[in-house]
Amino acid sequence: MDINNLIEHYGYGALLLGSMAEGETVTLLGGVAAHQGLLKYPLVILSVALGGMIGDQLLYLIGRRYGEAILERFKKHRKKIIKAQKLIQRHPYWFVIGSRFMYGFRIIGPILIGASRLPPKIFLPLNILGAVIWASLFTTLGYVGGEVVGPWLHNLDQHIKHWIWLVGVVALVWLVRYWFRHRESKQQD
């Protein structure tokens, strides 16, 4: 198993899917892979921006359709939700672009925006702009960080082999210990 070969073949698809859900870590790793020459920098930005945009667009549509029902489940956070909805009404452009950068708003932000009934013709272009800014920033950070992480990644295959052996030995010790305890408890009964 050559990790570099896997990244070269499946990297862009993995970036697209990964950025739909999580984002920052995947994007940073995409930047590192671009720094290592495994992926092309502009295509990393494009893949990540597209994935982030699609993910937020789906969450926005879920918010438009089911937003009120979803938000009702968060009664404990009702004051924060109302505050966020007021921010959306006062500054929709900043909120749509900025929610992608706010910790804890990656998933709930687009749902809140959809539930606030912000029109799709306003959300879509702002979502695209926010996704491109976000993808460019985090890919660049990963690319620059690749200078630090790069030497370690060249030996990643060897590191993975060591970790697999370590996990295997720990699992084996745990299983033997469990078996002895289970055997002793049966003998005492």
Image: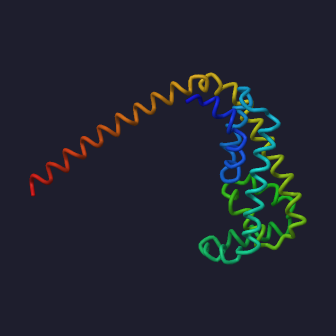
Q: 47 above or below 74?
A: above
Residue 33, image x and y in percent?
Answer: 70, 32
Q: 33 above or below 67?
A: above
Residue 88, image x and y in percent?
Answer: 81, 67
Query: Looking at this view, is 106 or 86 the one in front?
Result: 106
What residue is at 77 percent from the left and 39 percent from the top?
44
What residue is at 65 percent from the left and 43 percent from the top?
25
Residue 137, image x and y in percent?
Answer: 79, 41
What residue is at 73 percent from the left and 41 percent from the top?
12
Left or right: 33 with respect to 86? left
Residue 116, image quadrant: bottom right
What residue is at 71 percent from the left and 42 percent from the top?
27
Residue 121, image quadrant: bottom right
For the image shown, how many numbered marks are present on the structure?
A: 0
Residue 142, image quadrant: top right
Which residue extends farthest left?
Answer: 188
Left or right: 20 with respect to 182? right
Q: 108 above or below 25?
A: below
Residue 55, image x and y in percent?
Answer: 73, 57
Locate the C terminus and report the quarter of the image it occupies.
bottom left
Figure coloring: rainbow
Locate the N terminus and report the quarter of the image it occupies.
top right
